[in-house]
Image (cartoon, helix red, strand yellow):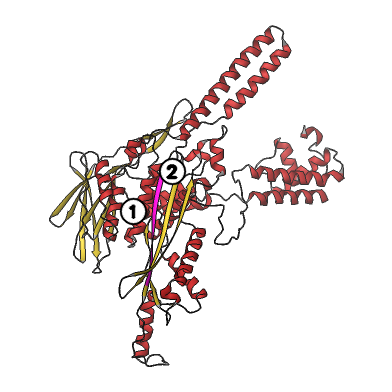
Amino acid sequence: MLERRLPAQRVGIHPAERAVLEAGAPSARLDTAGLLHYCSRTIMKMKIQKPLLPILALGLGLALFTGCATSGVKNPDATGVTEMRGDEKGFVGGTGVESQDLIRVSDKIARGILSAPQIASAATPPVVVLDPVLNETRFPINKNIFLDRIQAQLISKAAGKVTFLARERMDTLQRERDAKRAGNVTSTSDANVQEFKGADYFLTGKLSGLSTSSKNGVSDYILYTFQLIDVRTSAIVWGGDDEIKKQAQSDAVYR
Amino acid sequence: MKFALTFLAALLLGVTGCATKKPLPALTGDLITDGKNAIAYGPAKDRVLWEYRVGLAALRRGNFEEAKRQFDDAITRIGGIYTTDAGAKKARSFFNTEAKKTFIGEPYERAMAYYYRGLLYWRDGERDNARACFRSAQFQDADTEKNEYAADYVLLDYLDGLASVKLGSGDGADEFSRAVKNARGGSQPPAYFKKANVLVFIEFGNGPRKHATGRHAEQLRFGEQASRIRSVNLKLGSQQFPLVAYDDLQWQATTRGGRVMDHILANKAVFKDVTGGTAVAAAVTGVALAHHGSGEAALVAGGVALVAGLLSATTTPEADIRTWDNLPRFLTFAALELPPGEHSLAIDFRDASGLTLSTRTITFTVPPVSGQDTVLFLSEHKT
C-alpha cells in the first residue's frame, strides 16, 4: 500500500526512504534519520491536517510510555521518603521490636529511674554504668539501643541528677591519660592522679519473649525489664518494666 | 520539518521513559557477583532468594561481613511479611502465577536463613542474638499441618539450650529434652559441655529442589537430590569424632503437610479445567446450532466459548518453584574444648558405608581470652 502511494521514482525522495520502498519494509539497514523522514512523509501523505500533527506526535509519545509500563517494571519511580517520628507506627512492620516500642519503653524506664529515691534524693549525683541488656526473645536486636536511649533521656532531662560513665570509651580514655602522663600532650591537672570514677550503680535489663505460632497467625509478647543495681551491695534498688504484645497473620500465599 | 522535529521530540521522550528498565549485567559464573547483580538489577520479588544464595556462598568462602549483610536484609524482609504486599495479592489471583509473590521461601528456607545468621552472631560473641536466631528459625517450622512435625529441628533446640548454658541464663534442660525427643535415626545430640570453646558447624549433601506436578503444575513438590555424603569424621591430632547428621532438610521440607497456598492453587486449577470444559462445550454447541440454522444462538454459544476459553487460557495455577538451590541437606555440630593457640582440624566426608570421599582441613587459632567461643563453619560445598 505504501509503495502505491509513494512511488520510488518521485523527485526529492530520501535515500533511506528509497531503500525502504525497494525492500518493502523498514529494515535494520535504515538509519534513525531515514526512519523519521520516512515516517513523517508517510503520515503527510495520509493527508492528515497540520493542526492534528502535534496531537498525533503526543499520542505516539504516550503510546511509547504505555509500552514501557508493561515491560516488567511496575513502579519505576521511587516511592519517595516518608519522614516519620520514631514513635509512630510505620506502614512497614512485623511482630518484633520496633522503634515505637523502643521509644515507649525507654521513656517509661527513664522516668522511673528519675523517680527512684536513690536517684531523686541522692546528696550527690550517683554514678551509673550501663551493662548490656540480655536478649531472651526470638528477635535478634541491637542490644545497646535501649540503654543508649535511656542514657540520652536521663542526661538531657535529669538536670544533672545522674552521672554516666563512658566505659565503652575506656581504651581511648586510657590512651589519652597515658599520653598526658608521658608528657606527650598538655594537661590542666596532675595527670598522675587517678580520676577515673567507679560506678555506684549498674543499669541493665533483659528482654524476655513468649511467642506462639498457629494457623491463626503469630503472637509475640515481649517483656522489657530494667534494673538499677547497687554495685557495693548487689541489691536491686530499682526495677521497672513494660510489655508489648503483637499479633499478625501473613498473607495466605506465605502459609 | 516542524512536524519531524515534534515527532522526534515525542520519540525521544518515549525512549527516555523506557530507560528505567536496567539491563541485567552479563553472567560471570561467580555466584556472589551474579547474585549481587540480580539483587541490584533483577526483579524485586526475587531479591530475598538471591540474598539467601549470595549470603550462603559468602559464608562458605569466609566472607562473613558479606554473609551478614545478605542474611540481615533477608531476615528483615521475612519479619515484614505481615504488611500488605501487592505481589502476594497478585499471586492469589486466578490470572497470576504464585511466583508473582515476593519470595521469602518455604519454612525450611527461612529457618536456614536464621540458622546461618545465628552462627554468625555466635562467631561475633553475641550468644543471645544467636539464640534469638535459632529460636526464630525453629519458629518458622511451628505451624505445620501435623503437630508431630512442628518445630522439630534437633540442632536448633540444642543450640538454643547451649547458648543459654553458656550465657548462664538457664540450664537448657527443656531445649535439650526437645532436641533428644526429635532426634531421628540414632542422631542423639550429646549432653551440653559448658567448657567447650570451639563450636564446629558442619553441613553436607544437597538440599531439596522444588518442582511442580499435577495437570497444571499446581502441586509443589520437593525433589531429593543425589547426596553421597552421609556422615563426617572430625580428626584433631590423634583424636577422632565421628558425627552423623542431626537435621535433614529433605525431611523438614516434606513433613510440613499442605500449605494454604496449595488450596488456592488447587482452586485455580479447578477453575481452569471448568472454564476450559465450558469453552469446548460451548464451541461444539455453537457449531451444532450453526448447522441447524440457528445463527443467533450459534453466535451466543461462540461468544461463551471465546470468553470461557480466554478465562481458561489466562488462569495460571502453577506453583512457585523458585528454590534456594545451594542449601545443603544435612546439618551436624560438634563442641570441643581446646587450649589457646593454633590448631588444625581435618574433616572426612563419608558415604553410607563409611568410606571417605573427600577431606577438608582447616587451621584456626583459639584466642587466649576466656569466655569467647571460636566458631568454625565447614561445608562440603564451596559456593
| Chain at numbered mark 1 | B
The residue shown at (31%, 52%) is: B160
**Circles 2 and 1 on the same subunit:** yes
- The secondary structure type at the circle numbered 2 is loop
Q: Is residue B257 above or below residue A79?
A: above
All told, the count of numbered labels is 2
Earlier residue among tags 2 and 1: 1
* Mark number, residue B60: 1
Rate crowding at label 2 as few (under 14), some (14 to 19) or many (20 or more) other CA atoms within 10 Å: many
Q: In this rendering, does residue A49 appear at all?
A: yes
Q: Position of residue B166 (x, y in %)?
A: 27, 59
Q: Which residue is mark 2?
A: B105
| Chain at numbered mark 2 | B
Front residue of B287 and B315 = B315
Magenta residues, start to end = A202-212
Q: Compute the Cα span from label 2 to label 1.
A: 20 Å
Residue A203 is inside the magenta segment:
yes
Q: Position of residue B277 (x, y in %)?
A: 56, 19
Q: Mark 2 belongs to which amino acid?
A: Gly
Residue B125 figure quarter: bottom left
Rate crowding at label 1 as few (under 14), some (14 to 19) or many (20 or more) other CA atoms within 10 Å: some
- The secondary structure type at the circle numbered 1 is helix
Q: Position of residue A156 (x, y in %)?
A: 51, 75
CB under 8 Å between discs 2 and 1? no
Q: Mark 1 belongs to which amino acid?
A: Arg
Q: Is residue B370 above or below residue B145?
A: below
Looking at the image, is mark 2 or mark 1 nearer the viewer? 2
Residue B283 is inside the magenta segment:
no
Q: Is residue A98 above or below residue B248?
A: below
Q: Main secondary structure of the magenta part?
A: strand
Q: In this rendering, does residue B28 appear at all?
A: no
